Amino acid sequence: MFLSDHLSVNEQGHLTIGCHDAVDLARQYGTPLYVLDEDHMRRQCREYRQQMANLYPGSSLPLFAGKALCTVHTARVTASEGLGADAVSGGEIYTLLQAGFPMDKVFFHGNNKTPEEISLALDSGTGYIVIDHESELYRVEQAAAERNMKQKILLRIKPGIDCHTHEYVKTGQLDCKFGLALETGEAESMLRTAASLPHVQTEGVHCHIGSQIFETEPFCEAARRMLGLMAKVRDVLSLHILNLGGGFGIRYEEKDDPPPLSEYLRRISDTILQTSRDLGLPLPMLVLEPGRAIVGEAGITLYTVGAVKTIPGIRTYVSVDGGMGDNPRHILYGARHPAVLANRAAEPPAGPVTIAGKCCESGDLIAENVPLPEVREGDILAVLCTGAYNYSMASHYNRLPRPAMIALKGDRSFVIVRRETYKDLLCCDLQ
């Protein structure tokens, strides 16, 4: 059983999340249920903001990567904690607007922004648009010219760094679909082009090398290469923002051992200081984009166990009332999530089980070879570390309504996303 610092077991042997009994939450709100420990999320926001301010001598800003979990409530939480936002679609921008988020602290990303999304970004006062490719640069220039304004931009660079993570979440290598290549000269050429355009103001450069990275050196090497690029174009541009993206790993399994944030930041800070000094550059503003690192461990999903099916000598399937519709990470990446029997959390494991979802798909598994006590129908199963890329990647596969999401703040629990109904499934159907 893997428990992080906001999880424990009470006298009844039930899993607790903060001061809340997980079994009581399941009874009160039903299952499947996304649970967000807001207190834990806020602690992570403060850690990023405070440690960046303490360990980096220049100005800094953490952005919450909304693709990890984008709701009106989470946007308001991150805004109240002083973070900016990383948005990747018009829908995320619209959500931020509805939350009253300070739009001047929003960075708009994406490899294929539509004209409608670019218009929304400009009209809503989005602080920065991160340019992905040449034609997008000209589209933003034209849209800004039509509005007689000057839009702040960064250029997304792929620095040619291949980090050790899953193939689907590597984003810094040459053949990645995102950004402008550093090693071919494309990035420098586009920066020089941007410098000549009258309706965009190029403020800096951005890169993102991948996700779930447990090493510090890839971030340091990315910083060196990006600063080198900034130095190359200083004859035409004075760039002052260095955005190194996100990708800081969290613990999904006991064996996962990510460095503490302070270690990431000390190494990155030392690298930027030394490289800037060597290149004769002023110290840039440092921007980071944590998403999973803010909400990953803050999220827990509660399920009710249905069928328990043992295939002698092979495996035991524990089927729950959710699955790939609310957590597709296993079927996408082979991701592993720890799990706990919330109503018998103190009992020793009886053996490994495979947690199966209810979708009509053989691959609909949430976790495999999970050590659990003997599981019975009606048990409450808690799957941990589901705050990131669960709700945000949820679907209506098999016409399953998406679960509710509640937040826990102190001794309060409250709904932040209501449970969908069958009627909701038809809200866009023309009848």
Image (cartoon, rainbow, N blue to C red):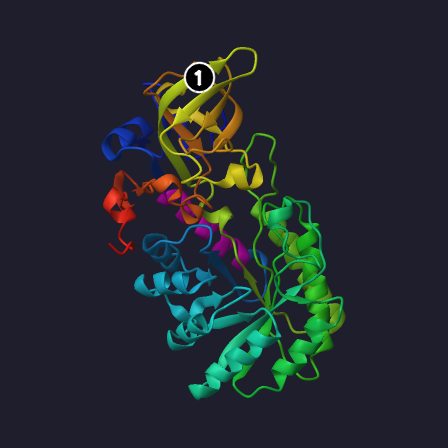
Where residue 156 appears, as percent x and y from the top left, is: 60, 67
Q: Residue at x 41, y 65 (%)?
A: 90
As drawn, 79 above or below 388: below
Foreground residue among 292 and 269: 292
Residue 349 shows in this picture: no
Question: Which is more toward the observer, 210 or 204?
Answer: 210
Residue at 42% in and 41% down = 298
Task: Tell me where the magenta segment starts and ends, as one range.
Answer: 37-53
Relative placement, left or right, of 400 versus 133 is: left
Label 1 CA crowd tier, 10 Å (few <14, some 14–19, many 20+): few
Residue 208 appears in view = yes
The residue positioned farthest toward the top in the image shown? 312
How many numbered discs? 1
- Horizontal relation, residue 3 to residue 38: left or right: right
Magenta run includes residue 291? no
Q: Is residue 328 above or below residue 159?
A: above
Image quarter (top left, top right, bottom left or bottom right) of the C terminus: bottom left
> What is the three-letter code of the residue carrying label 1?
Lys
In the displayed structure, does residue 393 sit left or right of residue 252?
Answer: left
Residue 197 locus on image (x, y percent) = 58, 86
* Displayed quadrant of residue 125: bottom left
Residue in view at x 27 percent, y 38 percent: 411
Element type at mark 1: strand
383 relative to 224 in the view: left or right: left
Residue situated furthest front in the rendering: 431
Residue at mark 1: 309
